[in-house]
Amino acid sequence: MKALGCLLLLVVPGGLAAQHVAIGPQVVFGDYREVSSDLHYRGGGIGAKATLEWKKFSADIALSKVKYKPTSSVIGTQFDASEVDVRLHYYISGPVSAELGFINRKADPEFEAQSVGAVTAGAQMAYLLGPGVRMALHGGLMFGAKYSGGGTTSGLGALQLGLGLTVDALHGRVRVTGDYGFQRFSRTTNDGSGPLRAPIQQSLGRIGFAISF
Amino acid sequence: MNARVVLVAVMALGGVATLRAQTIQNPTLRRAQQAFDNLDYRQALSAGQAALRERLTGFERARAYELLGFTYSGMDSILKAVDAFKQVVLLEPERTLDPNRTSPKALSAFQVALTQVLVVRQLVVDSVTFVGGQGVVPLRYTVTQPARVVTRVVGGSTSLRIDSTVANGQVNLRWPARLPNGDPVPAGNYTIVVDATVGQNSFSTSQPIRVSHGSVDTLAHLTSLPGYTYLPETEVPPKSWRPMGLALVYTGIALAGTSALSNGDLGSASLREGGTIGAGIVLAGFIMTLKKPAPQPARGNILYNQLLRDQITRRNAEIAQENTRRRQQVALTVAALPRSSR
């Protein structure tokens, strides 16, 4: 993850001068579940998204802070989830791009929910619906997931899926953005009494706009 | 009005002067002509011969011999008629008889006379304009007897032999109007001289010509090829439900994937977030389906236009080369001038 961060630091500034950059705020709303259907949270918050394009490369960097509140008044207390989602794309052919990135989500208070970090790898399919209207579907696996409360995930146990829409407005100077991201970690823990399933699942919707440079 | 009267008067005076030069003034010869018109051949013969002993102009002398020729023909003295016509031909080599107004006997005697006298007749130089080195000046003349005929062009310090041949009858020549080194003949006045020789007999005739130089017209550059027009490089594709379909497919995959990948221990998956964004995508796809499609590049037309542009560029390059060559060329105009009167 650190290596990926270093790579971003090296690649992104070079592309800023020459290629397209869009950055803007987003409204975020999400659904978070952990361990069982009883630990179910919903909430909203704010976020920001930056998109960079340079030759065959592009990068999406999304930051969000969601205040999750339990749907049940009996179990759980509200917490803030701060998430960084970085995805690098390399255009391959047709609508297909390869995707590599990482996510890092921190819960505050720390013990109300699991903080998690993982490297993501997958593919993205993008399609131009019309002039200035693009949609993208992406999915992949998340490797090396680390949890603040411990636990492990099998190789195919952490998955993500996403959907995105970008609509250019004002001759492309402004973009209306909408993103959906789904994450599922099939986490297992073992406190000595044997493996216990403690899955984590989040659906996140983001709607906003971005200024293009 | 006055100017018109003056013009008519001048033309009438000119005509009279011409007529006087071309009409018979000698009274003896006029008497002979009158006798011939009255079919009094003996009187015509004696008066004509008497006229020849008098002082006559060239025209009158030729008319006197011609009158004798006609008279001898009428009297069936063909040999004498031929002799008289030979004198006519020698005096006026260009003389011809109108077959519609001349008796066959006289005509045949004239033709026989032509074959017995060496003359070069009907030298004609056609007026032409051509690019130096790429055209010729047509010349033609008629030799009445088999003879060595040398055709030359003379003018200033230039004397060029155009042709040397043994010929009889009509001869057609093509003169390229070039100097021996290949350069075009300099502008100026020249004379085409035709010398015919048979033994001791020789005859020479000439035709003045004027050679003038001009610049050769250059070709205009092309902006389009005749018959070929540029095609539009973009075309609007027909309306399609593809955007709507793809939006539904993408959204369906995302929502179905969410449901499928959702962990069963956590209850049914939330489709609120995916549904919101998916609805936006489907709406965008629907709008894009209704919207007039954006013009798409027409690859075939682009290639066709590129070919057309390449062709025009290539043709213009050729035209530029051709124009460079033409600016170094000269347009020759050769015009026959009126012959000076004998």
Image (tube, coloured by chain):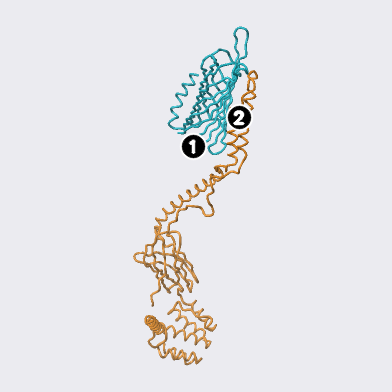
Chain colours: A cyan, B orange
Say left or right for B341 vs A207. Answer: left
Marks 2 and 1 on same chain: no
Q: Which residue is drawn at 52% across and 28% down?
A: A27
Q: Residue at x 43, y 28 (%)?
A: A14
Residue B291's place in the image compared with B84, above or below, is above
Q: Which residue is drawn at 59% across and 36% down?
A: B283
- Residue B59: image quadrant is bottom left
Amino acid type, residue under disc 1 in the picture? Gly
Residue B168's place in the image compared with B35, above or below, is above
Label 2 resides on the chain identified as B
Q: What element carries label 1?
A: loop
Q: Give the Cα distance between marks 2 and 1.
A: 26 Å
Work out whether residue B310 or residue B181 is closer to the camera in this orientation and state it.
B310
Rendered image: mark on residue B275: 2
Residue B264 visible in the shown view: yes
Say left or right for A189 vs B340. Answer: right
Residue extending farthest front:
A73
Label 1 resides on the chain identified as A
Nearest to the eye among marks 2 and 1: give it.
Answer: 2
How packed is label 2: few (under 14 Cα within 10 Å), some, or many (20 or more)? some
Rendered image: mark on residue A172: 1
Work out whether residue B304 or residue A71 is closer to the camera in this orientation and state it.
A71
Residue B142 drawn at (x, y percent): 48, 72
